[in-house]
Image (tube, grey):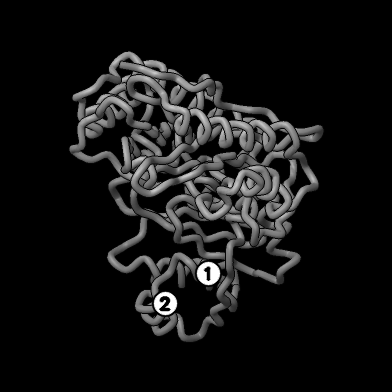
Amino acid sequence: MITQRLSRLRHVMVESDIAALLIASPVNRRYLSGFTGSSGMLLITNSNQYLLTDFRYMTQAPLQAPNFTVVEHGANPIENVKELLEQERVEELSFEQEHVTYSVFHSWSKQLSSIQWKPQSDIVEKLRRIKDDGEIAIMEQAAQLADRTFDHILQLIKPGIRESDLALEMEVYMRSHGATSSSFDTIVASGARSALPHGVASEKKLEHGDFVTFDFGAYFQGYCSDLTRTVVVGEATEKHIEIYNIVLEAQLHTLEHIKPGMTGKQADALARDIISSYGYGEQFGHSTGHSLGMEIHEAPRLSMYSDTILTPGMTVTVEPGIYLPGFGGVRIEDDIVITESGIKILTSSPKQLITLG
């Protein structure tokens, strides 16, 4: 897989007239090399690839990145980069402008004043949009772990329990069943707080009549899952049922009709048009979904502003919602893979309205 990724990257480098590329992003470094250490850079030329890291990783790095020449850098890594560029007879060096601060760039360019620096944008991120079979297999396991976590937490929901206690239990469950961590700060938002799309768990206690929204994911073997379900504590009112069923209809409609060749804008409209038709368009203020993979938010987005064409191998969320201040909100989310003929849904937690407690 690493060899294929490097081949794809070099194809882009040739097309973009890039003689050498310096990778500073830890996520992109892991994607291209397999190296999981906390420190290091990649230098990739048309014929060679180098992993520069410090003495702490000189045993780990060759094992995780066998496709790379591992270089132990000194106190100033850019000096080692300079030596490698001279060895490669490279006079232009491209770098990831989103991942290098101005102060770092100023220091680098001062030390390598003879090199022409060329900023690049999203070179590796664009490659990461299309997941290979190995990545999808890991993401499916991450999604299944999220499903099992939701099934587990359903047994603990009752009036009087704090949102933060539920979130902690979910984090413990995910980590004790193979996750490195959660994909992001776990959201447990109940009652009026469920109208907060990103209502991270608080000390609030669940009460009868609360919507409770759970938005969480497992970070597993370097990849994220992202699952959202909303339940009701006690008996659901007509308002609970109305709002829930609208969001469910929008989500199911999107899953049924989303397909390769669509733009992110067209996919977003699948959900947004249904919610708007019921008069709740103003209460659905975020995009219908986003890509995910090694990071929880990647490109492209299922957004009214996205013209990116959905392509087989892209992994995205489908997560419409309605949020009513003072009452509560509903969001339902699944992870999917765009395929040649449609989609594959990775998450499988039940979506009928669940009442508990």
Q: Residue 42's spot in the image, x, y percent?
A: 49, 57
Q: Earlier in the sequence, mark 1 or mark 2?
A: 1
Determine which quarter of the picture holds residue 328.
Answer: top left
Does 3 sit left or right of 53 as displayed? right
Foreground pick, 269 / 176 = 269
Disc 2 residue crowd, few under 14, some 14–19, many 20+, Cα 10 Å: some
Q: Is residue 5 visible?
A: no
Determine which quarter of the picture holds residue 257.
Answer: top right
Name the residue at 39% across, 78% down.
102
Q: Is residue 66 visible?
A: yes
Quarter placement of the C terminus:
top left
Disc 1 residue crowd, few under 14, some 14–19, many 20+, Cα 10 Å: many
How far is the residue under mark 1 from the one under mark 2? 9 Å
Quarter placement of the N terminus:
top right
The secondary structure type at the circle numbered 1 is strand
Residue marked by disc 1? 95
Cβ atoms under marks 1 and 2 closer than 8 Å: yes
Foreground pick, 20 / 296 = 296
Q: Residue furthest front?
A: 238
Q: Amino acid at mark 2?
A: Phe
Foreground pick, 212 / 281 = 281
